[in-house]
Amino acid sequence: MSVQEPTRQVTITEAVARKSIASSERNKICEDWVATCTALNIPLSKSDHPAMRKFLFENVTNGGAIPGFHHLQEKYLGNVYLKEKEALRKRLAKKPVAVIFDETPDVEGRCVLNILIAPLEKDESGKILAYLADTVFLEQCNHSTVSVSVVKCQVSAGI
């Protein structure tokens, strides 16, 4: 007959450490998932599809920790956007660029100004890519409001 050793109760410090490790792993997998979906133009709503849920749960480590798309959008998309914006700023730092902007009216008649920045050097694939730096909704569309928006965008992009 074997004798069972009494189980030791977990200390508060150990419990907090375990929870913080699990929390950081969950945050990492969620941010990685959002970054991957956005890089591949996969809508986050596809995360809720039953086939995708099954795949994530069965084939991805911690894939079951990925929440529904509303939670992904509210909690993680903003962080991924800021990281990508900072990476773009570093990629364009001290490089010659072309600033491209175009305005068009939206359904409500507001002026929508899209500002793109294209480095004048080819990337690894041999192409020159333009990046959407900002989209601005203007109440009035004239040379003054457009130029102020473009300059603000350039300053925020570090150009």
Image (cartoon, rainbow, N blue to C red):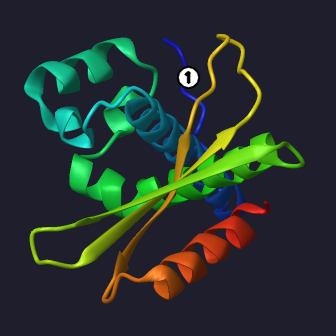
Please tell me whether residue 27 is drawn above or below residue 141 in the rendered image. above
Question: Of all residues shown, which one is farthest toward the front?
Answer: 143
Residue 18 appears in the rendering: no
Quadrant of the image occupied by residue 60: top left
Q: Splitting the image into 4 quarters, where does residue 123 fall?
A: top right
Residue at point 77%, 27% (across, down): 121
Would residue 141 appear left or right of 76 to someone viewing this image?
left
- Image coordinates for residue 48, horizontal then vertical, percent: 16, 37
Q: Amino acid at mark 1?
A: Val
- Residue 23 picture location, percent across and down: 54, 51
Please identify the quadrant where the C terminus is shown: bottom right
Please tell me which residue lies in front, 6 or 59. Answer: 59
Looking at the rendered structure, the secondary structure element under dot 1 is loop
Within 10 angstroms of label 1, few (less than 14), some, or many (20 or more) residues? Answer: few
Q: Nearer the viewer, residue 98 or 157?
A: 98
Q: Tell me what residue is drawn at x 69 percent, y 70 percent.
A: 156
In the depicted structure, whether residue 50 falls above or below residue 1:
below
In the rendered image, residue 100, in percent from the top left (x then y), is placed at: 55, 52
Query: Which residue is at 25% across, 37% downward?
Result: 43
Residue occupying the far right of the picture: 94
Judge whether residue 155 can be spotted in this image: yes
Task: Give the side of residue 49 with respect to residue 75, left or right.
Answer: left
User: In the image, residue 59 lies at what x, y percent?
Assistant: 35, 12
* Residue beneath disc 1: 3
Name the residue at 43% across, 54% down: 77
- Tell me if residue 154 comes above or below residue 151 in the rendering: above
Q: How many marks?
A: 1
- Left or right of 66 in this view: 86: right
> Is residue 151 placed above or below 154 in the rendered structure?
below
